Amino acid sequence: MGQSELSHLKEESIQASLSYEAYLELMEALVAKGKTSGPNQSEEFAQYTKMNLKRMQRLNKTIVLSDALASQCEKVDQEITFLALTEYWCGDAAQNLPLFNKLVEQNPKLSFKLLFRDENLDLMDAFLTNGGRSIPKVIALDTHSLKVLGSWGPRPTPAQEMVLAFKKSGQDDYQEFLKEIQLWYAKDKTLSQQAELILALSDWLSKHNK
C-alpha cells in the first residue's frame, strides 16, 4: 500500500505508539543495558544508540525556535498529531525528532507520538523515500479522524542531498560520511528543518481545514 492509498491511519497504530517522554525513558533503559531497538543488537548499533541519546538530551535543552516557526506554530488552531517512525540507532532521528517535541511544547493542539519502524513495516512501506525505508518519517494526522495530512523526513533537504551525493559517488567510507553529516547537523542547529516545518505546518493545517 502506497501513501497515495493511505488516507487514514488505523487507530491501532496510535494506541501502540509511545509518548516522547516514554520513548526517551525506554531509550535510557536500553542504553544502560548496552542494547538498542530493532532486530540488530550489534555492539555497533548499541554505540550509535548511546551517542544518539546524548544528542537528543542536548537538543532537548538547546533548541531555540525561530520567530517564524514559533509564529506558525501559534497559528495551528486544529488538533494535529505528529507520528514518527523511528529507531534508536538512527542518527538522523536523534537530530530531527527533538524539534517536533519542541513544537508540541508551544501549542497544546499539537501532540507527538512515536513508533518503531521495524515493528510497523506495513505502515513504513506507505511512506518510503526513493523506494527505501528511510527514517525518521513523521506523519502528520488529524488527531480525531486520523486523516493523513502529509509527512516529513527523513532529513532536511541539504542533508538529504549529501546522502544522495554520497550514494552516487560510489565511495565506501560510510563511517567518515556519518561524521560529515553529523558535523553538518551541529553547524545547522536545526535551522534547515525549522524552515521546512514552517511550510509543512501551513500545508498540513490547510488540508486539515478542508
Image (cartoon, grey):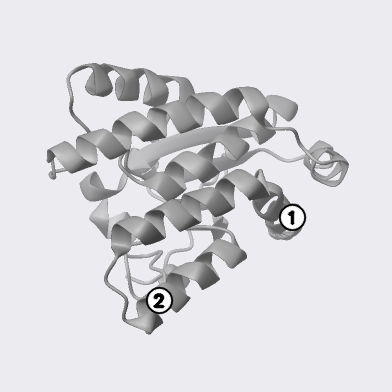
The residue to which callout 2 is attached is 130
Q: Quadrant of the C terminus?
A: bottom right
User: Residue at horizontal 30%, vertical 39%?
Assistant: 48
Q: Is residue 132 above or below residue 178?
A: below
Q: Judge from the rendering whether residue 165 lies leftward or rightward of residue 31; answer left or right.
A: right
Q: Is residue 188 above or below residue 3?
A: above
Residue 125: image location, x then y, percent: 31, 64
Q: Which label was assigned to residue 78?
A: none
Kindly indicate the quadrant of the structure image that contains residue 67: top right
Q: Judge from the rendering whether residue 118 lies leftward or rightward of residue 97; answer left or right.
A: left
- Foreground residue among 1 and 201: 201
Residue 24: image location, x then y, percent: 40, 23
Is residue 17 among the parts visible in the rendering? no
The residue to which callout 1 is attached is 195
Q: Secondary structure at mark 1?
A: helix
Q: Secondary structure at mark 2?
A: loop
| Amino acid type assigned to the residue bearing label 1 in the image | Ala
Residue 71: image location, x then y, percent: 86, 41
- Foreground residue among 178 and 68: 178
- Foreground residue among 78 and 99: 99
Kindly indicate the quadrant of the structure image that contains residue 45: top left
Residue 54: image location, x then y, percent: 44, 27
Q: Judge from the rendering whether residue 36 lies leftward or rightward of residue 111; answer left or right.
A: left
Would you call the spot at circle 2 few (<14 residues within 10 Å), some (14-19), or many (20 or more)? few
Would you call the spot at circle 1 few (<14 residues within 10 Å), some (14-19), or many (20 or more)? some
User: Residue at horizontal 65%, vertical 31%?
Assistant: 102
Kindly indicate the quadrant of the structure image that contains residue 186: top right
Counting residues from the start of the chain, the first of labels 1 and 2 encountered is 2
User: Residue at horizontal 74%, vertical 55%?
Assistant: 195
| Amino acid type assigned to the residue bearing label 2 in the image | Asn
